[in-house]
Image (cartoon, grey):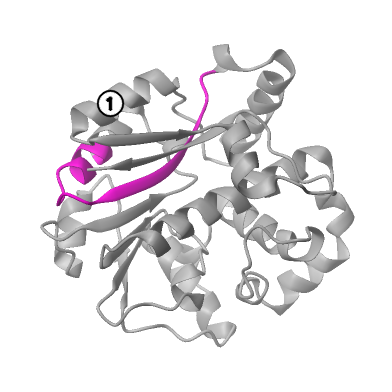
Amino acid sequence: MTTDATPKPSALLTATLRAAHQLLDKPLVLDDPLALRILGKEAEAGLRASLGELNTPFRTALRAILAVRSRLAEDTWHDSEAPQLVILGAGLDTSPYRMDLPLEAEVYEVDLPGALEWKRDLLQLAKISEREQVHYVGVDFNETQLEDALEEAGFDAETPACFTWLGVTLYLTPSDVKRTLEYIGGCAPGTSVVFDYVLAPELLEPQERSVMEAMAASLAQGGEPWKSSFTPEALEQMLREAGFSEVEHFDRERLTELYLSGRSDSLRLGGATRLIRATV
């Protein structure tokens, strides 16, 4: 594997916890039979040997939000009539390789060029076949605009699309988040986006704020500083101004009701991350 294909620490952590969910949590919130395979045999063996370390309250809450956010995004796409799916910050998301895609569907996986190279290397090693309907869109935002890269890959902004944007906004400045939402909001009516965000620190309980500050510091040391957090009201206004006509907010209580109610295990959500689904 080339140096350029070295993953971001957060992408590897996300993929590892998504795979751990398949082993630790029953019933599954996100049934992802490829989550372990895509990690590779060596990484899978390491994961199985260290499951106890991933079953702490903090890591359990992380697994919960990762599973729930992916489930909401996949449910939204499943219920959507949009023929285009755009996965912003695709990482090791396996959904395009395990979902039944309609014949007319086109999927665009967007990430840094090195991240996509890393993913395709792992797909090949895991013998997970690439699909003709999946397009890999490498974007270095310092050099290329998202809309230009998508258009070059064949995306049609005049046709409805479902955008998923998970685990990304916290690494972007508020102005970058706004610019992306304005682009999506300018796409065809019926276009939707599902994304998560970190709640503004002043809205967190002291203990949760301390945990999030420690996590942010750790990721910053790994070269991935957090750059934004929001209040629900600020994002509501941003989305309305960007052209979205419907905005749905998903807090811990609503997500628990949808996906975690009636569980007898310890899979619980924290309160620091929220989700939004908005439609043009």
Disc 1, SS: helix
* Residue at the image point whose x is 43% and y is 70% from the top: 117
Q: Is residue 263 above or below residue 45?
A: above
Q: Is residue 98 magenta?
A: no
| Other residues around mark 1 within 10 Å, as few (<14) / some (14–19) / many (≥20) | some
* Residue at the image point whose x is 85% and y is 59% from the top: 51
Q: Is residue 184 left or right of residue 229?
A: left
Q: Is residue 130 left or right of residue 27?
A: left
Where residue 67 sits: x, y (%)? 62, 53
Where residue 98 sits: x, y (%)? 51, 77
Looking at the picture, which amino acid does disc 1 mark? Met
Q: Is residue 158 above or below residue 118?
A: above
Q: Is residue 190 magenta?
A: yes
Q: Is residue 18 visible?
A: yes
Q: Is residue 136 above or below residue 276?
A: below
What residue occupies the far left of the structure in this picture?
Answer: 158
Question: In which quadrant of the rendered view does residue 220 lie?
Answer: top right
The stretch of residues the image draws in magenta is 180-200
Q: Is residue 16 above or below residue 255?
A: below
* Residue at the image point whose x is 69% and y is 64% from the top: 19
> Mark 1 highlights which residue?
238
Question: In which quadrant of the rendered view does residue 155 lie?
Answer: bottom left
